[in-house]
Image: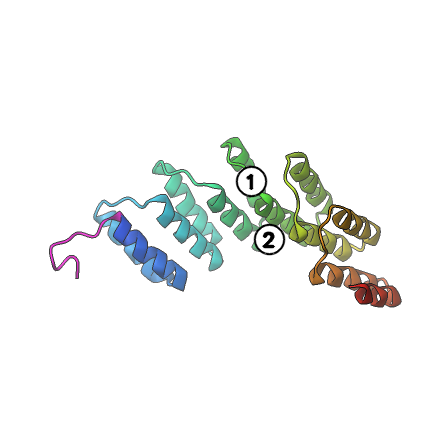
């Protein structure tokens, strides 16, 4: 309708519609609008790119999201912490932790500070693939860098230890969590109980759940 009235949609108009479609998960419509913008010589702004990358990651199309991410950088639009973290999380959920770790290194090289969410995503990725040594190394790096792990970071690592059958380490981390003043949640206790049950220590697991 804008075009029929002789008004040309600008980057902001397109960005608003693209963000709306991203919110609805309408990937095909988003890609069509981006193509339209390119034909008209309009450049997407960081906000539009962020929305597209987030949508692609949510749809599990992380490789495509990274292509959009690289295109964004080639056009001189530099991503922030949120965009990097979205991609890191997307790759970790696919089990591609090496790529996520590479993105973390890239963030640091560009002086973009990773936050607790970025670190937790990769720690979770390492735990899911049974690489507990790498997960702990990253956890320590995070603390030495001045970041405070939250209940999610602790729980992810505790769950990793429980799945690996390393209950001593899991409980040591649980104690550290409590000493830091962070209250373990239901997921934390469930992970510990599950680990104990797998070792046949069902009575101890039962006692633990009644302590909650």
Disc 2 marks which residue?
Answer: 95
Q: Which residues are magenta?
A: 1-11
Q: Residue at x 71, y 63 (%)?
A: 186
Q: Give the foreground label among 1 and 2.
A: 1
Residue 89 horizontal side relative to residue 196, left or right:
left
Helix, strand or loop at mark 2:
loop
Helix, strand or loop at mark 1:
loop
Q: Residue at x 37, y 42 (%)?
A: 71
Residue 140 horizontal side relative to residue 52, left or right:
right
Estimate how packed mark 1 is, as few (under 14), some (14 to 19) or many (20 or more) residues with alpha carbons within 10 Å. many
Q: Could you tell me how many numbered marks the image carries?
A: 2
Residue 137, horizontal then vertical, whole percent: 70, 39
Is the residue 6 above or below the residue 81 in the image? below
The reply to whether residue 55 is visible in this rendering is: yes
Seen from the viewer's position, the closer of residues 212 and 125 is 212
Q: Quadrant of the N terminus?
A: bottom left
Q: Quadrant of the C terminus?
A: bottom right
Q: Residue at x 51, y 32 (%)?
A: 111
Name which of mark 1 and mark 2 comes first in the sequence.
2
Residue 84 horizontal side relative to residue 72, left or right:
right
Q: Is residue 41 magenta?
A: no
Q: Residue at x 80, y 50 (%)?
A: 175
Is the residue 104 above or below the residue 93 in the image? above
Could you say which disc has been placed on residue 62 in the image? none
Cα–Cα span, label 1 and label 2: 20 Å
Residue 6 horizontal side relative to residue 83, left or right:
left
Residue 103, horizontal then vertical, whole percent: 53, 41
Disc 1 marks which residue?
Answer: 114
Q: Quadrant of residue 184?
A: bottom right
Seen from the viewer's position, the closer of residues 207 and 86 is 207
Residue 98, horizontal then vertical, whole percent: 59, 44
């Amino acid at each position: 309708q804008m075009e029929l009235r002789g008004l040309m949609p600008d980057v902001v108009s397109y960005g608003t519609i693209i963000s709306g479609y991203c919110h609805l998960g309408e990937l095909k419509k988003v890609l069509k609008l981006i193509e339209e913008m390119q034909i008209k010589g309009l450049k997407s702004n960081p906000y539009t790119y962020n929305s597209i990358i987030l949508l692609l990651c949510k749809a599990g199309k992380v490789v495509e999201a990274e292509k959009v991410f690289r295109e964004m950088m080639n056009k001189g639009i530099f991503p922030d912490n949120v965009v990097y973290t979205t991609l890191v999380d997307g790759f970790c959920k696919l089990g591609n932790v090496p790529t996520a770790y590479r993105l973390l290194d890239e963030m640091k090289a560009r002086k973009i500070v990773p936050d607790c969410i970025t670190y937790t995503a990769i720690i979770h990725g390492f735990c899911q693939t049974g690489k507990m040594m790498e997960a702990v190394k990253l956890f320590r790096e995070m603390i030495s860098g001045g970041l405070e792990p939250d209940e999610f970071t602790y729980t992810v690592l505790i769950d990793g230890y429980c799945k690996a059958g390393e209950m001593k380490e899991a409980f040591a981390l649980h104690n550290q969590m409590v000493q830091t003043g962070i209250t373990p949640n239901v997921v934390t206790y469930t992970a510990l109980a599950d680990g104990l049950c797998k070792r046949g220590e069902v009575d101890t697991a039962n006692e633990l759940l009644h302590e909650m």
